[in-house]
Image (tube, helix red, strand yellow):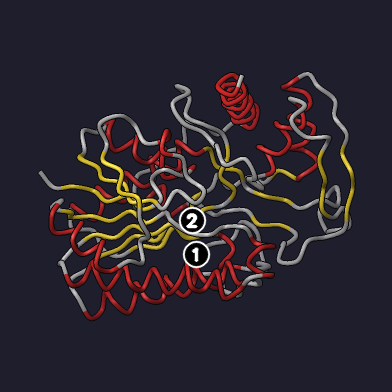
């Protein structure tokens, strides 16, 4: 039986992908350096190899020994302001190491590659919802580091027998509806996780960065996609590639935006807790509004969202955070 390699499979989105693969009867191996992932996020019975995806000796050996036919690549640094402060760290991890991973895939004749990209490749889009054909003008080293990998995939596919799907995520949120996985990194910067932690008293309130954007209420507008829906898009991508499908780049979002202030109010309402919100200045690298056009992922991959409901997403995030608190008690 062929095996799917999930890099970053002990992290937030990667752990949901592993569950999705297991539910579909796939054989999975996880490669994660555990810098932000958790060993406990990898389900029992799934092999976890602790190491870096840029380690070519380790990866080549793994691809051969585990009979890998597809790589789903999640492992990356993802904090936009941090990328502005440490661009070389982001280019090393997200771009240079991805080049090494691709070299291993080509050397070992792995035919299918699914890449976790980002809406940050668009920068400040000229129109919303933004389609995949929009000009790419990333404004942060994070966005640039991901776009470079998209370019590498395109060029590598022309030269070698490798087919790929690039999925450009918008804002990922929520948790596994069965409570098996969620956003566990304690210093995560995801808005919904931060707001939920504020509601549960784990933070002394929270900050909203900028209320002077050209949006209806002045705060940034984002498209929030539930994490299990996102994992299902990857499963559809894997089926597409194994069925002989062509290379594809597709947005993953719901084609609807919520402002930061709307999300904060939703968390307050769903949790029943009022918490302090401090208004701060804009952060570098944050576009005013970005919402996904999702026709490609729907029509080419046949993906349909199941959890497109902000209240449900917030409830999942609350339940997961309470579970983490109970584990610490």
Residue sitting nearer the eye, 274 or 133:
274
Name the spot of residue 144 as percent of width and height, x first.
55, 73
Mark 2 Cα-neighbour bin, 10 Å: few <14, some 14–19, many ≥20: many
* Disc 1, SS: loop
Name the spot of residue 313 as percent of width and height, x first.
59, 31
* Disc 2, SS: strand
Q: Give the residue pinned by disc 1.
A: 132
**Residue 45's mark?**
none
Label pair 2/1, CB-CB below 8 angstroms: yes
Q: Residue at x 51, y 33 (%)?
A: 182
Looking at this view, name the residue that lies furthest to the left: 1
Task: Say whether residue 264 is left or right of residue 55.
Answer: right
Task: Say whether residue 123 is left or right of residue 211.
Answer: left
Choose top left, top right, bottom left or bottom right for residue 19: top left
For the C terminus, the quadrant is top right
Placement of 99 over or under 82, stated as above or below: below
Residue sitting nearer the eye, 308 or 47:
47
Placement of 259 over or under 181, stated as above or below: below
Task: Say whether residue 210 is left or right of residue 60.
Answer: right
Q: Residue at x 73, y 35 (%)?
A: 195
Name the spot of residue 278 as percent of width and height, x first.
89, 44
Placement of 100 over or under 260, stated as above or below: below
Placement of 94 over or under 258, stated as above or below: below
For the N terminus, the quadrant is top left
* Labels 2 and 1: the sequence-earlier one: 1
Q: Give the residue pinned by disc 2.
A: 251
Mark 1 Cα-neighbour bin, 10 Å: few <14, some 14–19, many ≥20: some
Query: Distance from label 2 to label 1 (Cα)?
Result: 7 Å
């Amino acid at each position: 039986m062929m095996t799917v390699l999930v890099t970053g499979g002990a992290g937030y989105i990667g752990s949901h992908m592993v569950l999705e693969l297991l539910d579909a009867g796939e054989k999975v191996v996880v490669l994660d350096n555990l810098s932000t992932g958790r060993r406990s996020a990898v389900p029992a019975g799934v092999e976890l190899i602790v190491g870096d995806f840029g380690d070519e000796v380790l990866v080549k050996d793994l691809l051969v020994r585990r009979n890998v036919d597809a790589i789903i690549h999640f492992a990356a640094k993802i904090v936009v302001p941090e990328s502005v402060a440490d661009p070389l760290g982001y280019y090393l991890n997200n771009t240079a190491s991805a080049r090494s991973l691709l070299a291993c895939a080509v050397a070992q004749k792995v035919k299918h590659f699914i890449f976790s990209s980002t809406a940050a490749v668009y920068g400040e889009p000229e129109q919303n919802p933004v389609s995949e054909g929009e000009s790419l003008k990333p404004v942060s080293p994070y966005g640039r580091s991901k776009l470079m990998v998209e370019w590498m995939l395109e060029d590598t596919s022309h030269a070698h027998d490798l087919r790929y799907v690039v999925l450009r995520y918008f804002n990922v949120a929520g948790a596994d509806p069965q409570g098996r996985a969620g956003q566990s990194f304690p210093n995560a910067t995801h808005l919904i996780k931060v707001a939920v932690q504020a509601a549960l008293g784990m933070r002394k309130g929270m900050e909203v960065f900028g209320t002077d954007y050209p949006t209806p209420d002045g705060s940034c507008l984002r498209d929030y996609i539930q994490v299990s829906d996102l994992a299902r898009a990857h499963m559809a991508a894997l089926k597409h590639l194994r069925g002989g499908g062509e290379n594809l780049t597709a947005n993953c979002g719901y084609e609807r935006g919520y402002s930061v202030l709307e999300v904060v109010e939703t968390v307050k309402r769903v949790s029943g807790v009022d918490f302090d919100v401090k208004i701060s200045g804009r952060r570098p690298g944050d576009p005013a509004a970005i919402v996904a056009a999702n026709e490609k992922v729907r029509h080419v991959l046949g993906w349909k969202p199941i959890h497109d409901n902000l209240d449900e997403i917030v409830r999942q995030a609350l339940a997961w955070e309470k579970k983490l608190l109970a584990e610490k008690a």
